[in-house]
Image: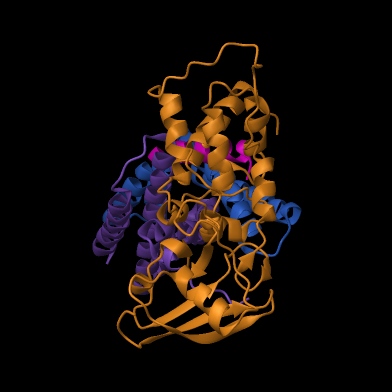
């Protein structure tokens, strides 16, 4: 971990703190209301707000998780720095792609 | 050399750091699955509906409660780290760390109570 | 001669990396320290035992060893405080190679000190006026709070991040770097911040605070390292550090 990774890690964490609080509130609401897929889609479809909120969330989470996993791998696994970094990047890309797909699914289709 | 048990590992702050790490790993494993499931909403939501109905079982609700706990405890642990790194040094951090874990547990329990 | 004929059961690490614990029976004495115990073994039971000590009064840090799982100064650890059931297990400091028995090789500890640029870099000469340093400025207060390190290695031995990450410079080296970052006479901060911002530098610290719990001088390396994290992040954002 160096200063560059550190700054990105902490910055994405700070960005996500309010997003997580909002997300937990949303989940509580959704489960209380017992929303179906149709209910959810009705709310999210075509919404720039949802897309922006969760777009930012997915981007930040992908970066944050990637750097975090990289740290854990270099400290707890026998992988060397390069391989650990590679694995972490793959995870970050996977999260970003799947997250983007989910947002598209909920907002655009 | 045999690994001697290092007793200071039992300190609340060390455990807080470990929980932070484990919850982060668990979330990193869970998130791709979560995104994938949400992606099932593509093409009208029938797949998502099926999943939502499947997830109505108590065991799944329990697991979801666990995930809410993980998310909350990871958030609070992260806030602890940000506080240590950026604000003036304060005593009583151990108490704060324990409180944070308790708060996370409460949030998760409330979620469970409402969901079951 | 004081009281009881009670004996302690003392297991000492013998040999190198692939050694083993060997048990000795040591008479218990009043106000006995762990260093007294080790010394007794070497003088009366086994002269081949290797261990380090110097001042034996808690000012040099040479006698640090792992006692019942915790790195401590053996001269300042009373037996009655740690040997509850009459048993002691003593080994060399962890996270360092073993030379022999209770003696750890401190070389890497000091190499990392250098790597962290924990060395004063003069900015003036003898021909300049003596610098007037006020003790109550925030920078000097921060430096003073961290300056009493005597390089005993206890924090390094107790740090799990050191254990997990061979690159990590460690709490002592980084604490010294922090004192110099706060020393207004020092002229080496550009290189120093670069050094502690690199891989294995201050950002590897996870704030477990074992170092703070264990330091016999009651120093707080986690706080010093947090200070370094702030300074390096600011420098990086300003473009003063290259990665």
Q: Quadrant of the N terminus of chain C?
A: bottom left
Q: Colour of chain B?
A: purple
Q: Quadrant of the C terminus of chain C?
A: top right
The chain drawn in blue is A
Which residue is rendered at x = 47% and y = 49% of the image? Answer: C207
Is B49 in the magenta? Answer: no
| Nearer to me, C64 or A26 | C64
The chain drawn in orange is C
Which residue is rendered at x = 54% and y = 51% of the image? Answer: B42
Which residue is rendered at x = 57% and y = 11% of the image? Answer: C129
Q: Note whether C206 is above or below C32 in the view shown.
A: above
Q: Quadrant of residue C31?
A: bottom left
Q: Is residue A2 left or right of residue B40?
A: right
* Main SS category, magenta section: helix
| Nearer to me, A6 or C162 | C162
| Nearer to me, C92 or B103 | C92
Q: How is the image coloured?
A: by chain
């Amino acid at each position: 971990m160096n200063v560059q990774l550190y700054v990105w890690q902490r910055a994405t964490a700070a960005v996500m703190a309010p997003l997580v609080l909002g997300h937990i509130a949303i989940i509580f609401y959704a489960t209380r209301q017992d929303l179906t897929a149709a209910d959810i889609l009705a709310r999210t479809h075509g919404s720039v707000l949802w897309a922006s909120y969760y777009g930012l969330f997915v981007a930040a989470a992908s970066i944050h998780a990637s750097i975090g996993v990289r740290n854990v791998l270099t400290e707890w696994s026998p992988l060397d720095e390069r391989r650990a970094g590679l694995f972490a990047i793959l995870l970050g890309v996977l999260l970003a792609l799947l997250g983007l797909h989910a947002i598209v699914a909920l907002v655009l289709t | 050399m045999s690994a001697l048990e290092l007793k200071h590992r039992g300190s609340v702050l060390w455990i807080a750091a470990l929980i932070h790490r484990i919850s982060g790993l668990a979330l990193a494993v869970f998130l791709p699955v979560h995104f994938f499931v949400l992606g099932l909403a593509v093409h009208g939501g029938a797949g998502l509906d099926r999943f939502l109905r499947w997830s109505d079982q108590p065991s799944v609700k329990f697991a979801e409660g666990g995930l809410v706990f993980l998310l909350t405890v990871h958030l609070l642990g992260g806030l602890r780290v940000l506080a240590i790194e950026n604000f003036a040094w304060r005593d009583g951090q151990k108490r704060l760390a324990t409180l944070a874990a308790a708060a996370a547990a409460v949030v998760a329990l409330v979620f469970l109570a409402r969901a079951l | 001669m004081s009281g009881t004929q009670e004996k302690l059961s003392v297991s000492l690490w013998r040999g190198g990396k692939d050694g083993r614990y060997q048990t000795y029976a040591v008479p218990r004495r009043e106000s006995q320290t762990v260093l007294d115990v080790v010394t007794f073994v070497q003088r009366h039971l086994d002269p081949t035992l290797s261990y380090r000590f110097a001042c034996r009064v808690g000012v040099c840090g040479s006698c640090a060893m792992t006692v019942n799982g915790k790195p401590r100064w053996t001269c300042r650890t009373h037996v009655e405080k740690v040997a509850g059931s009459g048993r002691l297990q003593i080994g060399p400091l962890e996270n360092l190679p073993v030379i022999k028995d209770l003696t750890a090789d401190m070389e890497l500890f000091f190499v990392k000190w250098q790597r962290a640029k924990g060395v004063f870099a003069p900015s003036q000469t003898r021909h300049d006026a003596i610098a007037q340093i006020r003790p109550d400025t925030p920078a000097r207060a921060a430096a003073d709070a961290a300056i009493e390190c005597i390089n005993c290695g206890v924090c390094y031995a107790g740090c799990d991040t050191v254990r997990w990450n061979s690159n990590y410079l460690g709490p002592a080296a980084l604490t010294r770097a922090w004192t110099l970052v706060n020393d207004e006479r020092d002229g080496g901060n550009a290189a120093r911040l670069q050094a502690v911002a690199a891989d294995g530098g201050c950002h590897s610290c996870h704030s477990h605070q074992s170092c703070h719990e264990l330091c016999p001088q009651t120093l707080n390396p986690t706080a010093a390292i947090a200070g370094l994290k702030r300074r390096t992040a600011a420098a990086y954002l300003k473009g003063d550090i290259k990665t």
